[in-house]
Image (cartoon, rainbow, N blue to C red):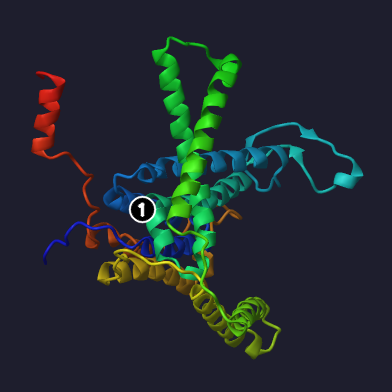
Amino acid sequence: MRTPLPRAVHPAAWWGWAIGLAVAVSSTANPFLLLTALAVAALVVTSRRGSSPWARSFRLYLWLGLFIVVVRTVLHVLVGLKFGDTVVLPLPEVTLPSWAAGIDVLGDLRLEGLVRAVSEGLRLAVMIACIGAANALANPKRLLRSLPGALSEIGSAVVVTITVAPQLAESVQRVMRARALRGDTARGIRALPRVALPVLEDTLDRSLMLASAMDSRGYGRRRVVPPTTRVLTAFCTLGGLLASAVGIYGILDATTPGWLGGPALLVGVALSLTGIWLGGHANARSTYRPDPWRWPEWLTLASGAVAALAVQVVMRSDAASLGMPVEPLAVPALPLVAVAGLLVGALPAFLTPPPPPPATRGPSVQRRVAVVGGPS
């Protein structure tokens, strides 16, 4: 089997894979499955992330997940429902007024409740790690280029919002380096005005440059659309949203008629897609060298869907194995079907093309720099 040439996988495929993995994680509190999903996400990110600045953001999501687990545990110790037979730490209980009945402040910390709190926090942490994996693997600018024309303006706002935090951190680092070169060693609150004003000025300069670039590329210019097309677009969009809401309600409520579930949801999705397609005609834009969608993208998308489907199959056949048994406390089961589905989610780490290497200077450019800079 030939090794695929280096290229970037379509960002929508990475997001579909991450959403499938997150859906699988959201249906289980089994620590074995949660740690397996976390290992799969970390493996794919380590193997297929590029050299862009956002590719190094996965570690931040891991720290955020650890913070969530700690906060969930602390909240359980302070105001959580204490249940179980094994007392881990005896603590005094604070008596609250009658209007706050049912809330326990402190009290004896029991092992069963503590294990449930940690497992619930771990589930949320792994879901955030899955979304962080998509952010580390998918280029947001390329994802914006792949969106339909009707969603380009919303996508531009989302991309600008996502890239604000990295650019702000980069501005702070530049200002701190400049202060260090000038011999300014002030720290803490005293240094805040000296750092905040240059960062604000740099942010405004970046905003003006972004506005000029978007205006020069024709952003916001729209074609002339007949009134009937505008009315039909609004009808399809609004009708699709209402039908989708009715369909989701019918799926969640088992007492509703059958036609309010899946059929209504399919009609809503079809109307919404039609509205997006009609709305895209009003957006005058073109795409230079669109990202290809080939078998690696289908493989990535299918691996995330298989992970979610495997967990759903186990939920319908043996839902107890997806939970953490705490009453009584026991070792959780290991559903092999769910484990196999999550391991399928690791296939993009081996079967997709590796990311393109970072751009480097050629030998002639390096020799020219060495001559101009003097002997090395």
Pick the front one: 144 or 3: 144
Q: Residue at x 43, y 27 (%)?
A: 173
Question: Of helix, strand and loop, which one carries label 1?
Answer: helix
Residue on which the image places disc 1: 137
Q: Where is residue 339 in the image (x, y as percent from the top left)?
A: 38, 63
Pick the front one: 84 or 144: 144
Q: Position of residue 134 (x, y in %)?
A: 41, 55
In this view, 168 is above or below 278: above
Instruction: Tell me how many marks there are.
Output: 1
Q: Residues within 10 Å of mark 1 (few under 14, many from 20)?
A: many
In this view, 194 is above or below 85: above
Q: Residue at x 61, y 77 (%)?
A: 237
Q: Position of residue 176 (x, y in %)?
A: 45, 21
346 sits to left or right of 69: left
In this view, 286 is above or below 274: above
- The image quadrant of residue 254 is bottom right
The answer to whether residue 331 shows anywhere in this view is no
Pick the front one: 262 or 295: 295
In this view, 93 is above or below 250: above
Q: Which amino acid does label 1 sit on?
A: Leu
Q: Position of residue 26 (x, y in %)?
A: 53, 60
The answer to whether residue 209 shows anywhere in this view is yes
